[in-house]
Structures are given as structure tokens and as C-alpha cells.
Amino acid sequence: MLFDLIATLSAGFLLAGLALGLKFLLRGRTPAWIVPAAAGLGMLSYSIWSEYSWFDRASATLPDGVEVASSNEVQAWYRPWTYIVPQVDRFIAVDHRMSRRNEEHPGQILTGVLLMGRWEPTRQFGVVYDCPGARRADLVDGVVFDEAGGLEGARWIQLEPDDAVLQAACR
């Protein structure tokens, strides 16, 4: 967040400096508002670029074996340009490197799920997906595996069969 503040201010100073240089070259024949307008344009442009490029930058840092399964696009009244092109502010990724199957329960898969959001810490947790049953159970306190590898104490959540995260985990 501090980096974004410094970069936003730097973009404003850069464009203000260019406008000031243009004003000097034209010997003052530019309007008086050109320098503050250029500073504002620079800061606004950097902020928009930073918000829109966050998803691509964050997903590019994911290691091999981690697949982005779902993303959330938002529109906000205080960012009117998001009504034209919605902005991605968070996404869910499946960590296939953690995926495990049990021969006793062939339709189920244990895998890791990553929740990543703009301005939020990344969260990672284990999930068991029941692929044929289109449901999931989060591995939270109190959930244990029995002798056969089944779950005890799990709360199963029914999902739509076409749920993007379910489909990514079961592939």
C-alpha cells in the first residue's frame, strides 16, 4: 500500500514536471491550470492502471500447479469507468500441488484453495471436494479423517454442478 502511494505521487510529480517543462518551452503561453491538471491526470492514470493490472500481476506470481478458478468483477459508482470495463478485485485459485485422492473414496479429492484479494492478505485452506456429489467440506477445526479416509465432523456444502472452483478441483 505504501508502494502504491509513493508510485501515485511520483506519477503526479512526473506529469507535473513535464507540464512545467512544456510551459517553460512555450514561454508561459499555456494556461495556468496545466501543471496541477497534469499532476492530477498522472495520479489518476497510475491509480487506474494499478487497479486494473492487479489481477494479471497477482495471478502471474502463482507457482506452477496453482490454477485460477474464479474471479470477482466489481463495478463502483466512485469508479465510473468500471461500468464500462469491470475490475477484478479478488479471485480463488486451486493448488493442485496439494491435491490427493483416496482409493477408498475415488470421487473425492483433497486440495488446497487460495483466496486472494486486492488489499487483503492471502488465505489458504484445505478443502475436500466430492466431485460426483457436487459438494465441498472445508477442513476446519473438528474435522478429522477416519480409518478409511472418510471425513468425520465435516459440514458439507452443496454446490452447483457447474461451480468453477469445483470443476477446477475435480479436473
Image (tube, rainbow, N blue to C red):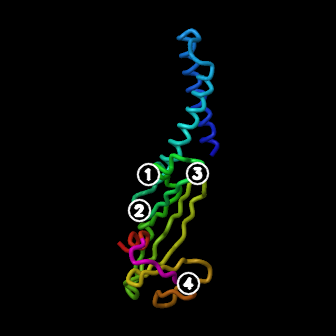
User: Quick check: 136 left or right of 105?
Assistant: right
Q: Please name the residue shown 54% across and 77% down the image.
A: 138
* Residue in view at x 52 percent, y 73 percent: 126
Which residue type does callout 4 highlight? Arg
Q: CA distance from mark 2 to mark 4?
A: 25 Å
Asked if residue 64 lies left or right of residue 13, the reply is left
For badge 2, the amino acid type reads Glu
**Disc with the residue nearer the chain's start (3 vs 4):** 3
Q: Earlier in the sequence, mark 2 or mark 4?
A: 2
Residue 100 placement (x, y as % from top left):
42, 76
Q: Is residue 129 left or right of residue 19?
A: left
Please report the bounds of the magenta region as a residue range: 155-163
Determine the secondary structure under disc 4.
loop
Q: Which residue is mark 2?
A: 67
- Circle 4 sits on which residue? 155
Tell me how far mark 1 sits from mark 4, CA to CA.
Answer: 33 Å
Q: Which residue matches tag 3?
A: 77
Q: Is 74 within the magenta?
A: no
Looking at the picture, how far across and down is residue 27, in whole percent? 57, 9
Type of amino acid at the residue the image marks with label 1: Ala
Between tags 3 and 1, which lies in front? 3
Residue position for label 1: 60
